[in-house]
Amino acid sequence: MKRRAFIRQTLSSSAFIAAGGLGLQSFSSNGSTRITILHTNDVHSHIDPFGPEDGRNANKGGIARRAKLIESIRRENPNNLLFDA
């Protein structure tokens, strides 16, 4: 019974969210908007960059580098979505 209630609640919430954006279409302009979608994944505690002695991944990675790259992309285009899984 709990599973059915969960599925029903999920479906009704999804329908509510999807229908909620329909009214906003009347406010949109006729021009097009460029949206950049950024996705990061599988950090797995690699918050520090790899060192120069790490072979294939030498001097790559790290949260600071990622933040700098994301900020530069955001400066180019303010209309972006950042997803992290």
Image (tube, grey):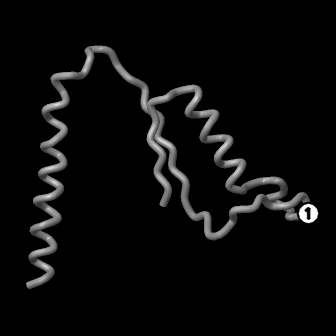
Which percent across, then down, holds residue 13? 15, 58
SS at mark 1?
loop
Vertical side of 40 occupied by 2: above or below = below
Q: Badge 1: few (under 14), some or many (20 or more) residues near its Cα, within 10 Å?
A: few
Vertical side of 81 occupied by 34: above or below = above
Which percent across, then down, holds residue 67? 64, 46
Residue at x 9%, y 68% (from the top left corner):
8
Q: Residue furthest bottom?
A: 1
Q: Quadrant of residue 26?
A: top left
Q: Amino acid at mark 1?
A: Glu
Which percent across, then down, holds residue 83? 46, 51
Q: Quadrant of the N terminus?
A: bottom left
Q: Residue furthest right?
A: 53
Q: Quadrant of residue 75?
A: top right
Position of 74 compared to 7: left or right? right
Residue at x 68%, y 42% (from the top left corner):
68
Q: Residue furthest top?
A: 30
Q: Which residue is mark 1?
A: 53
Q: Relative to the observer, which residue lies in front, 42 or 79? A: 79
Q: Quadrant of residue 10?
A: bottom left
